[in-house]
Amino acid sequence: MEVPVPLPFKGIFSEAKSAEVNGLFAERLDDFETDGLSLTARPSAVVDDTSSEALQRFGFEFGDPTYIEVFPDRYEANGQTRSRFSIAEAMCAMISSNAVFVDGQNAPARWDGTTWSNPEFTVVTGIDPAEFDNIIAHHDRLYAWRSGDLDFYYGGVGSVTGAMTLFPLSRLGNITGKISMMVSLTIDAGHGPNDLLAIITTTGMVVVYEGLDPGDDLDWRLFGRIQMAPPVNRWCHAPYGTDHLVLTEAGLVSLIGSIRQSRQAFISAMAEPVRKELLEVIKANRDRQGWDLTVQPDGQRIILNTPLSATTFGQFVYRVESEAWTRWRVQARWWHSLISELNFTAADGKLGSLNDAGDEVITSIWHSSWFSFKRYSQFMSMIPTIRAKDAISITLRVLTNRDSTPTDLAEALQQFAVQPEIADTGRVTFDEFIQVDEAGASYQIRMEITGKRVELISILGMLE
């Protein structure tokens, strides 16, 4: 009997590791993507070897678009530099056609598209503005604060220099933790859209203000307070459509949903398939640098960048059109965009990009969910259909024991190498008969395919 073997067009589902779930999910899906019709290797990660080794990059899109690069000893844009001396992460706010930088160890810096200058902020509380290491722009005002503080400072409308006024958030009382991030929001609260500033602390408390001027009691009021899980770090948030996503120690949270419901609102339907696996990675690597949450400019991918060690990185990637999660192993420590292009800063600091037509040799891995064939007890053989550019190698295992030992895995191993039939055709297809001869109540397929532009189209199983 010939039966199609389902491919994981719905991506990863953590429960597939131990339970028999829908075959459209996978236990493991590394460096693959799905459009709902086939599986393809992720886009090639192309690193520009001529680029500099920067710590961070920020897209400057006022006037001539360019990247502003952050180095340990300088900021640089269009060949113009300004000195800094720090390996700390910098934060940038875009306001009034300027980019304003703080890093907690140097005086703030300003880039206006042509030259660098010192914004010369002044405060009346004795704090040195060089201690600011966080900054955002909200309603054409700068808001700045120090990590470890619960109070913040705000500037004048449109101002990129001058006085910064203290706002003592700590005076509210019962506010735990220190400020981790601030997020500018527009939310429909039932009486038209409201412009809100959400302040999220290291303990997960969210304090929300409505209004335009923190110094005017008639134009600034407390909108609400809620408690959610602590955010992973200050970078793990991103706008997503009309919502804003925050990665917390309990999973991915909708910020606007949380504010509306006055309680933590998980992105359940979207993030639940990988929540268990993601929490394991968070627990193991919580304090490492490299955590980042990015939405591709066209909205088609959500990328959770995760450090896996002190020097290696990976990603949980959600493809919006197919509503499927996969995991990538791109060595990127920072994701960013310039206009409509999603780029990354590689582990070695060079500038990288994604290219659907690139020729990176990628090893894509699929571990199916456990599945059964109902009336059939013998899995005799299979015919996978795989296309790729140029030669490919395939590693295949079919398992019947969920507690397979290393010996079991070694005995189940089958390997194949496929070369183009005609030189320089630029395409190879594998659709060969593979003997399986396994009997069991349920099965798991483990396949690794190494090649360029790999596409797994279908698998046909022969049963008895």
Image (tube, helix red, strand yellow):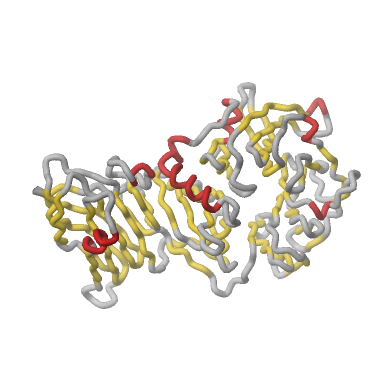
From the viewer's perspective, is residue 459 above or below residue 202?
below
Q: Nearer the viewer, residue 239 or 410?
A: 410
From the viewer's perspective, is residue 327 above or below residue 389?
above
- Which quadrant of the figure has residue 441? top left
The picture places residue 300, in percent across and down from the top left corner, at 47, 48
Name the residue located 74 percent from the left edge and 67 percent from the top edge.
Answer: 74
Name the residue located 77 percent from the left edge and 35 percent from the top edge.
Answer: 169
Name the residue located 18 percent from the left edge and 52 percent from the top edge.
Answer: 460
In this picture, residue 319 sits left or right of residue 446 = right
Q: How many marks?
A: 0
Q: In the image as oriented, which residue stretches furthest toward the top?
A: 191
- Which quadrant of the figure has residue 192? top right
The picture places residue 62, in percent across and down from the top left corner, at 69, 54
From the viewer's perspective, is residue 328 above or below residue 162?
below
The picture places residue 45, in percent across and down from the top left corner, at 47, 64
In this picture, residue 116 sits left or right of residue 223 = right
Name the residue located 41 percent from the left edge and 44 percent from the top edge.
Answer: 321
In this picture, residue 292 sits left or right of residue 444 = right
Q: Is residue 330 visible?
A: yes
Q: Is residue 337 visible?
A: no
The picture places residue 212, in percent across and down from the top left corner, at 76, 34
